[in-house]
Image (spheres, grey):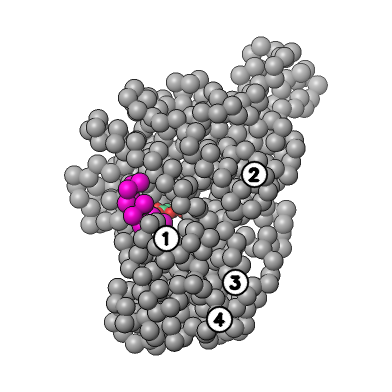
Amino acid sequence: MPSTSVEPCTFALFGALGDLALRKLFPALYQLDRAQLLHDDTRILALAREAGTPEQHLANIEEHLRLYVAKAQVEEEPLRRFLARLSYVHVDFMKAEDYAQLAERVGASEQLIAYFATPAAVYGGICENLAKVGLADRIRVVLEKPIGHDLASSRRVNDAVAQYFPENRIYRIDHYLGKETVQNLIALRFANSLFETQWNQNYISHVEITVAEEVGIEGRWGYFDQAGQLRDMIQNHLLQLLCLIAMDPPAELSADSIRDEKVKVLKALAPISGEGLATQVVRGQYIAGYSRGKAVPGYLEEENSNTQSDTETFVALRADIRNWRWAGVPFYLRTGKRMPQKLSQIVIHFKEPQHYIFAPEQRLQISNKLIIRLQPDEGISLRVMTKDQGLDKGMQLRSGPLQLNFSDTYRSARIPDAYERLLLEVMQGNQNLFVRKDEIEYAWKWCDQLIAGWKKSGDAPKPYAAGSWGPMSSIALITRDGRSWYGDI
Ligand code: BG6
């Protein structure tokens, strides 16, 4: 947990009129201010190059704040305080001369946080221009994903930024790391000996990670079509979750100790090629179907779509980790757009007891499961076996939950948005929840070999109806191993 002491800073938001800034970043900064977590002297500079007056742009930002912050949390006094911190600066990011006005606004010894909510292609140019006006030595730079679209391009972006800033001042965002329950994975695993002693191939049979979204592409077709679900979700969010589940205990809670352990997991991921591509990986693309009872178009019929695209909107795969802890324990990953509901959860399936004494027909249902729900209804549930109630039940077994629902248990606390936590951590100079260069690169390396395999095979993604759990072959992927996706209906 962060302490509440935060140094003053100037927070310069590049790309301040973009969707991410309006929808997520300004609301998160407002919430920090509302919770009294910004220093009185902290100022926020909204940097963009759109035509229009500062007053118009600030009004636009306020309008979006009122739209994206829950009504009950839009309070006039904190909002007034927040808006008073904010100024708009017109900057063409690639023009060095535009940066002089930025330098003038930052006090001589003040900490500057530069958040790049812009395409990664301009990160290097912004860094160069910041350095030219003498700001480089007191900046923390925050980089949004995607950092590149493969290993080579991500290296180019990282190298361009590294020319001006050392790694300990670069904060690469993966917003999943800011989610409350994702951070809880560390507490759950390493503060409970109950779990840590069982966390290996002797006791765990397999792990499922599902990140399903109910929405489709929502006006982002052009961007998404260049990426696809593997680059958009697996390369970052799902592999980060996998690392937090699979890593060894770090020596301490420092950023580098945690990242060192995550990198070891990424290095140990078995490449998937040849036969494995057909049996271990499923790519899907949604076709027309139903979402919440309403007919919705397929991916190729969305606004601005190209009807020939073979970009995937769904991926399911089986990953294997080549180390002692996880030998023979598959990790099944699944993520897609236009699925039946928004659901992010991790299910740890424990092995059945070594010595079995109950009726043989009940054997199949005997296995403890730890279900970690990231969203919605954040919480943890442990399915344990008990005896069914009643005189007529004999020793009939039944699986029931030991449940911890965060919003019920910690009633007073609002669960903060991931960006609130991440922005606060940047202001405090804490890199634990950010991704190191080598993590990004190993993740790309692993994804690149999958993409190359797909390209070589030339196979089109399998269709699935919007509102379903993905192509039939994603069910076959796991049933082939004698298992099923937990809780699918
Ligand atoms: C982003 C992806 O990183 O994560 C989006 O680019 C996706 O495509 C989003 O919708 C999902 O985030 P969350 O927090 O809503 O699960």
Nearer the N terminus, badge 4 or badge 3? 3
Local crowd at mark 3 within 10 Å, few (<14), some, or many (≥20)? many
Residue behind label 4 places its C-beta within 8 angstroms of ligand 1: no
Q: Spatial distance from mark 4 to mark 2, Cα to Cα?
A: 35 Å
Q: Spatial distance from mark 4 to mark 3, Cα to Cα?
A: 23 Å
Q: Nearer the viewer, residue 153 or 39?
A: 153
Nearer the N terminus, badge 3 or badge 2? 3
Q: Which residue is mark 4?
A: 109
Name the residue: 29% across, 36% down: 452
Q: Amino acid at mark 3?
A: Leu
Nearer the N terminus, badge 4 or badge 2? 4
Q: Amino acid at mark 2?
A: Pro
Between tags 1 and 2, which lies in front?
A: 1
CB atoms of marks 4 and 2 within 8 Å:
no
- Give the quarter of the figure containing the N terminus: bottom right
Across and down, in percent, residue 215 comes to 40, 52
Q: Nearer the viewer, residue 139 or 426?
A: 139
Nearer the N terminus, badge 1 or badge 3? 3
Element type at mark 3:
helix
Magenta span: 145-157
Local crowd at mark 4 within 10 Å, few (<14), some, or many (≥20)? few
Q: Which residue is mark 2?
A: 250
